[in-house]
Image (cartoon, rainbow, N blue to C red):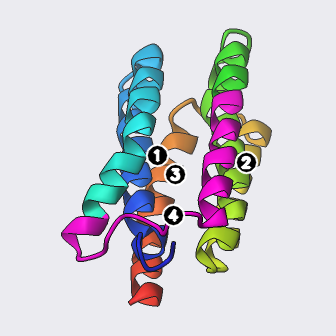
């Protein structure tokens, strides 16, 4: 997995761009549109990550039967559960959509350490979870967690690329 997908770095870049784009749309005051950008963009993260992997000379395809690919697929279910919870809560506490998604995505990133064998994913997961808690406890505006998450992912992607070779 680490070799095929360049340590997951291309996917982290794609995800960072989705978080940043949806955060910028939210900052402009378009909450529903930003959530749509997040949802549609989120569906494109994996294909964009594969495309970027191939552009930098990696296969973007893991070996058949690799048990870690099952973990990647299974952990994707967390995202759909998170989206349902975050969107439902959004109607009661509007500023919590991205904080909930940050905690869900952070939880999923913790599993990426097993998939890629890189402890940086424990850090990325923990930072996303902290962004979520900070957003709730400091009552941050709707767009803060999305922009923070996007910037953080793009910075961590640089570390992943440096560590992967």
Q: Is residue 96 visible?
A: no
Using the image as rendered, state which of residue 61 and residue 160 is in the foreground: 61
Q: Position of residue 148 (x, y in %)?
A: 52, 51
Q: Label 3: few (<14), some or many (≥20) within 10 Å?
A: some
Q: Label 2: few (<14), some or many (≥20) within 10 Å?
A: some
**In the rendered image, which quarter is residue 144 located in?**
top right
Give the number of marks: 4
Mark nearer the N terminus (2 vs 1)? 2
**For the magenta stretch, what is the residue range?**
53-82
Q: Is residue 69 visible?
A: yes
- Asked if labels 1 and 4 touch by Cβ distance under 8 angstroms, the answer is no
- Asked if labels 3 and 1 touch by Cβ distance under 8 angstroms, the answer is yes
Q: Which mark is residue 134?
A: 2
Which residue is at a point 35% across and 25% down the rendered structure image?
28
Q: Most extreme residue toward the left, as rendered?
A: 55
Query: Mark 2: which secondary structure?
Result: helix
Q: Position of residue 101 (x, y in %)?
A: 64, 37
Q: Position of residue 4 (x, y in %)?
A: 41, 73
Residue 68: within the magenta? yes
Q: Which mark is residue 148?
A: 3
Using the image as rendered, state which of residue 132 and residue 37 is in the foreground: 37
Q: Which residue is mark 1?
A: 147
């Amino acid at each position: 997995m680490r070799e095929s997908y360049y340590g997951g770095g291309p996917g982290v870049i794609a995800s960072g761009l989705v978080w940043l784009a949806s955060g910028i749309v939210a900052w402009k005051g378009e909450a529903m549109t930003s959530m749509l950008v997040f949802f549609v963009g989120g569906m494109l993260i994996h294909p964009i990550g594969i495309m970027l992997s191939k552009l930098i000379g990696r296969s973007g395809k893991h070996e058949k039967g690799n048990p870690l690919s099952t973990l990647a697929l299974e952990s994707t279910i967390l995202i759909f559960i998170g989206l349902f919870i975050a969107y439902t809560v959004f109607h009661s506490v509007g500023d919590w959509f991205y904080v909930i998604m940050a905690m869900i995505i952070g939880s999923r990133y913790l599993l990426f350490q097993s998939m890629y064998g890189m402890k940086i994913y424990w850090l990325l997961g923990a930072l996303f979870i902290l962004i979520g808690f900070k957003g709730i406890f400091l009552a941050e505006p709707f767009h803060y967690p999305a922009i923070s998450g996007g910037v953080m992912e793009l910075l961590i992607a640089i570390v992943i690329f440096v560590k992967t070779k």
